[in-house]
Amino acid sequence: MLQVARLAPKLLGEATELIRAFLIHQQNSDGGFRDRDGRSDLYYTVFGLDAFEAIQADFPAEKIAEFARSFESGEGLDFVHLCCLARCWAGLTGSQTRAGVECPFRQEILKRVENFRSSDGGYHPKQGNDSGTAYAAFLAQGAYSDFGRKVPEPLRLVQSLKLLETSDGAWQNERFLKPGGSESRATVGSTNATAAAVTLLRHLDLPVNDSVAHWLISRVHPQGGFLASPSAPVPDLLSTATALHALSGMQYDFEKIKEPCLDFIDTLWTNEGAFHGNWTDETVDCEYTFYGLLALGHLSL
């Protein structure tokens, strides 16, 4: 994702400097980046760090490392923030401005990630769950990849994803349960879960049916951008970025939707140097700013 996001400045031009200024403003004195309430958060720190890398701007790596070190090996972190800790260290270690920053807790962090393995071979944000989620599988694979490791028992992970397939040819995020607890295959997929599954399968060098690309491209709104689901009222930037990333990974030609998608992203841009998440979103943050960069990177090709 980061490699593609680095192409965004080709379309942004001088506006890239506005993004740099916005990112600087989003960093708190403890080195972390602000969530939507202004508090330092590992989740938003990852997006701030990746956004800086995407626009290839210098950033205070040691200050961010100081924030990351405060979490040590991640004891007490929930699953999402644990994976964000891994991603944060990977961003610092791989940065040209890292000034010798290294993660001293790699093995311990990955051991904690395995505590969230579900009974079906996937991963779930809550420990001890019987079934995994598409999002958690994506995050876990990312944590291992960030530390240069392969996810253990990948075939069991793929089997878990198989159970998340929907009857319309996509993926849902979680297993569908009928009232009373009986299980049934969901009929409608989710754009982000499908994009996560496609990206994960591609990382594992496994094929994806061409029909999935057609399902994703069917989520394009007439005014550009992608819907989070077939019933979503408006497109959003997260779905747009992840869908474009998945389609690109499948080598699908989305030339016909480039202009509408660029127009949609333009409606979310603000001269603060950031992007809103959708047409109803009134707040800007590092997360959606990175997704704007990722989407623009794909659309610049």
Image (cartoon, helix red, strand yellow):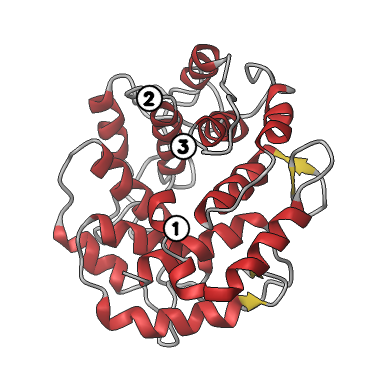
From the viewer's perspective, is residue 220 above or below residue 291? below
Looking at the picture, does residue 135 appear above or below residue 232? above
Front position in the image: 294 or 129 = 294
Q: Earlier in the sequence, mark 3 or mark 1?
A: 1
Say which of marks 3 and 1 sits in front. 1
Q: Which residue is found at the position 54% from the left and 18% from the top? A: 109
Residue of label 1:
5
Disc number at residue 148?
2
Relative side of 245 to 215, left or right: right
Residue 26 image offset from top left, x and y in percent:
75, 53
Amino acid type, callout 1: Ala
Q: Is residue 250 visible?
A: yes
Q: Amino acid at mark 3?
A: Leu
Q: Would you say the residues marked 3 and 1 are in contact, meaning their CB atoms lie under 8 Å apart? A: no
Task: Say what secondary structure mark 2 lies in.
Answer: loop
Mark identifier at residue 139: 3
Q: Position of residue 84 (x, y in %)?
A: 58, 35
Please give the name of the residue rendered at 46% of the width and 18% of the height, measured from the top-left corner. Answer: 114
Q: Residues within 10 Å of mark 1 (few under 14, many from 20)?
A: many
